[in-house]
Image (spheres, rainbow, N blue to C red):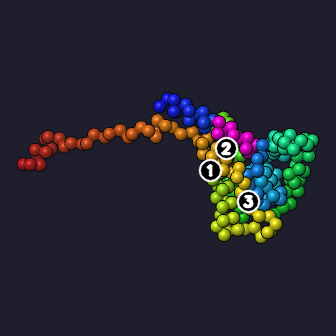
Amino acid sequence: MASSSGWMENMASIASRIYFFLIILQIPLFRVPCRSGMCTTPLEVTSSQLIATEICPAVVVKALLYPGVVANGIINNTTIPKWDNILNIYNLTNVKEASPEVDLKRLEVLAGSYFAVAGAIVGLMKRGRMSMFGTLLVIWGLVKEGFLGKSVNTDPTKPVYIYPTMVIALVCALASVKYDLKKITSSAPVRPIAKPLKSSAKSKLK
């Protein structure tokens, strides 16, 4: 039991790290219209909403986006953009003027992206279920729009799409959840059957 528990602990730790890099390095998971144009990662959806609503300072959003900018520059062998140009790259400078309707029509994707980003960051320190809930919410929102005939996208040039990498994100999100094998495998304690007292049994017979 100890060896299996340790193996699952290591697997959950590795899965949470992989999920973190998928989110923070902005590996494309889907394609959906958002306030900044077309978003392909939960971090882009979250960043556009954070800038538009001014929930947190722009420097925090830049810090979240910068690792993906660096990774993209290394992969494409291009010059890494300057810190001051990060918002321009993601078309976030005028996002406050964009209509919030495009995000409000996809609340599952918006809420799921928030949970996915928060779960990826928090999961490095303490694994929980935020990553799993966030990923499932995003998938449900995209599936509902793309496959169940409940599309809210009126522009045929901006179709909703799910990339195969979403499967990797889902597997990592499910595997990163910490399960307690002791609680799962332990059976419920046997409860003693209450027996009537001898005195009460005799009094009923009289």
Q: Is residue 24 visible?
A: yes
Calculate the distance from the C-alpha at mark 1 to the C-alpha at mark 2: 9 Å
Location of residue 160 (image quadrant): bottom right
Q: Amino acid at mark 1?
A: Phe
Mark 1 against mark 3, which lies toward the viewer?
Answer: 3
Q: Position of residue 49 (x, y in %)?
A: 78, 54
Q: Mark 3 or mark 1, which is nearer the start of the sequence?
A: 1
Calculate the distance from the C-alpha at mark 1 to the C-alpha at mark 3: 20 Å
Q: Are marks 1 and 3 in contact (CB under 8 Å)?
A: no
Q: Which residue is mark 2?
A: 119
Return the residue found at the far top. Answer: 2
Q: Mark 3 or mark 2, which is nearer the start of the sequence?
A: 2
Residue 80 relative to residue 190: left or right:
right
Look at the numbered disc 1 and give the secondary structure of its residue. helix
Look at the numbered disc 3 and give the secondary structure of its residue. strand
Task: Give the answer, above or below, for where 2 lies relative to 158.
Answer: above
Q: Which residue is mark 3?
A: 161
Q: Amino acid at mark 2?
A: Gly
Q: Which residue is mark 1?
A: 133
Type of secondary structure dominating the magenta stretch: helix
In the foreground, 14 or 120: 14
Highlighted range, magenta: 14-24
Calculate the distance from the C-alpha at mark 2 to the C-alpha at mark 3: 23 Å
> Residue, x 67% and y 55% (percent of image)?
138
> Residue, x 78% and y 43% (percent of image)?
25
